[in-house]
Image: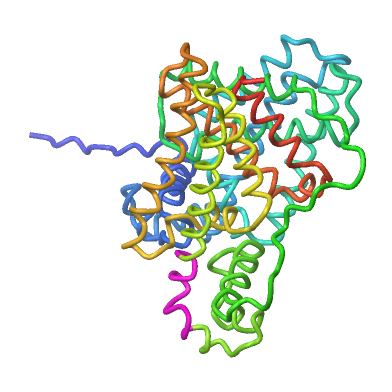
């Protein structure tokens, strides 16, 4: 009896399949927490087979991020390039395409927001150049629809709109894909329509903390680590770097913190304490039962905490991925409880929203603030805090 050879067919786009598997792992465990062999095993191939498609782990990350940029370029060209003055229908078509891609590829949005610093300098420049060009074309289209906007304001709103789509990467809440995409489009449209506050007359209020005496050496170490982690990322900073920034030898840092991970844990705990105290004050000073006012005060509290210190930003970029394992569950619990307060208030103010839709909406509002305070192109604006509050309350639809 003749035996027929069984021919094994390879997937038509093995490279994209491998990149997608790697992206999910990077999102779940962080870029540095994943090895090439782990990616190969998760994809069901050998290490040498993976190397036939990618030179190294960095090239996989670059492939994922550049593919995301290409998707945005193609969607933008299809919707806007032929239009002298974009119609609302064309803008909505662009938003719907971006929303659908965000829902389908949540891991790519996460990597773009947090892991881009691990790329080569050349790939970082290409991503900045191409994403900047896309955003400028969006801003130009927005000014044709809203001619009262100046260039910086139109770019600010477009950055915020991009953050709405990127917000899908910071949580795992799911609803039906079509409803998910529709909701993201609705939230992005609220951002693009928002009226920004007028420039405040007189000097701006400085919310920076006032130094009363010389801080302890432990506090100096904590402050130096916070600044370095924010600027360079957790893995790029050594204990020697932290010691040098504090004016002590690297080994002396261990007198105050047993490891770099314990330093990050202390920063995340400090950020959680600030958020918790701010939320308690916002809720306590709101006249019951005015949940709308409480939600507005909670928004102001969040922006004040975020712009007043770097600890919250570091806790997002380092996050629970790299803290001591014994503290991870508690930090995650605090974060979830904090978001749950927002969701509870929002579902009371807007009862037409289900709990999951409200959670998606809350995360979109929070992500706008998180992203824009880290975006060098806009984070130097003199009244950014007031603008963040205005955009967040617009997304929440409580104005």
98 to the left or right of 16:
right
Q: Position of residue 282 (x, y in %)?
A: 56, 38
In the rendered image, the residue lying farthest to the left is 1
Q: Is residue 368 above or below residue 260?
A: above
Q: Which residues are magenta?
A: 254-265
State whether the magenta stretch is mostly helix, strand or loop: helix
Task: Look at the image and tell me in which quarter the C terminus lies.
Answer: top right
Q: Nearer the viewer, residue 351 or 362?
A: 351
Q: Residue at (81%, 41%) from the top-left corner?
A: 383
Q: Position of residue 70 (x, y in %)?
A: 66, 36
Q: Is residue 84 above or below residue 30?
A: above
Task: Look at the image and tell me in which quarter the N terminus lies.
Answer: top left
Q: Nearer the viewer, residue 359 or 272?
A: 272
378 to the left or right of 309:
right
Q: Is residue 86 above or below residue 122?
A: above
* Residue 264 within the segment the image draws in magenta: yes
268 to the left or right of 138:
left
């Amino acid at each position: 009896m003749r035996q027929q050879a069984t021919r094994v067919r390879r997937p038509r786009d093995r490279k994209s399949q491998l990149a997608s598997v790697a992206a999910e792992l990077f999102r779940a465990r962080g870029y540095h927490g994943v090895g090439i062999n782990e990616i190969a095993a998760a994809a069901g191939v050998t290490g040498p087979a993976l190397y036939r498609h990618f030179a190294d782990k960095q090239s996989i990350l670059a492939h994922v991020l550049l593919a995301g940029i290409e998707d945005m370029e193609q969607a933008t060209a299809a919707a806007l390039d032929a239009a002298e003055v974009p119609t609302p229908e064309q803008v909505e078509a662009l938003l719907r395409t971006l929303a659908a891609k965000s829902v389908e590829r949540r891991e790519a949005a996460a990597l773009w927001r947090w892991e881009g610093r691990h790329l080569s300098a050349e790939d970082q420049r290409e991503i900045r150049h191409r994403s900047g060009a896309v955003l400028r074309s969006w801003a130009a289209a927005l000014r044709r629809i809203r001619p009262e906007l100046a260039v910086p304001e139109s770019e600010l709103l477009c950055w915020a709109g991009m953050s709405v789509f990127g917000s899908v990467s910071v949580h795992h809440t799911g609803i039906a894909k079509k409803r998910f995409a529709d909701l993201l489009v609705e939230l992005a449209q609220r951002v693009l329509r928002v009226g920004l506050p007028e420039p405040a007359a007189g000097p701006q209020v400085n919310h920076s903390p006032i130094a009363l005496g010389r801080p302890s050496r432990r506090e100096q170490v904590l402050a130096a680590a916070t600044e370095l982690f924010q600027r360079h990322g957790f893995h790029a900073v050594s204990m020697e770097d932290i010691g040098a920034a504090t004016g002590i030898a690297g080994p002396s840092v261990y007198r105050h913190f047993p490891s770099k991970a314990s330093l990050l844990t202390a920063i995340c705990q400090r950020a959680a304490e600030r958020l918790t105290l701010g939320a308690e004050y916002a809720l306590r000073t709101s006249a019951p039962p005015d949940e709308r006012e409480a939600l507005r005060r909670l928004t102001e509290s969040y922006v004040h905490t975020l712009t007043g210190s770097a600890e919250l930003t570091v806790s997002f970029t380092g996050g629970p991925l790299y803290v001591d394992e014994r503290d991870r569950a508690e930090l995650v619990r605090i974060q979830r409880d904090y978001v749950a307060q927002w969701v509870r208030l929002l579902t009371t103010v807007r009862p037409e929203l289900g709990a999951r839709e409200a959670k998606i909406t809350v995360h979109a509002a929070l992500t706008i603030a998180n992203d824009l305070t880290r975006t060098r192109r806009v984070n130097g604006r003199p009244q950014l805090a007031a603008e963040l509050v205005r955009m967040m309350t617009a997304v929440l639809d409580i104005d």
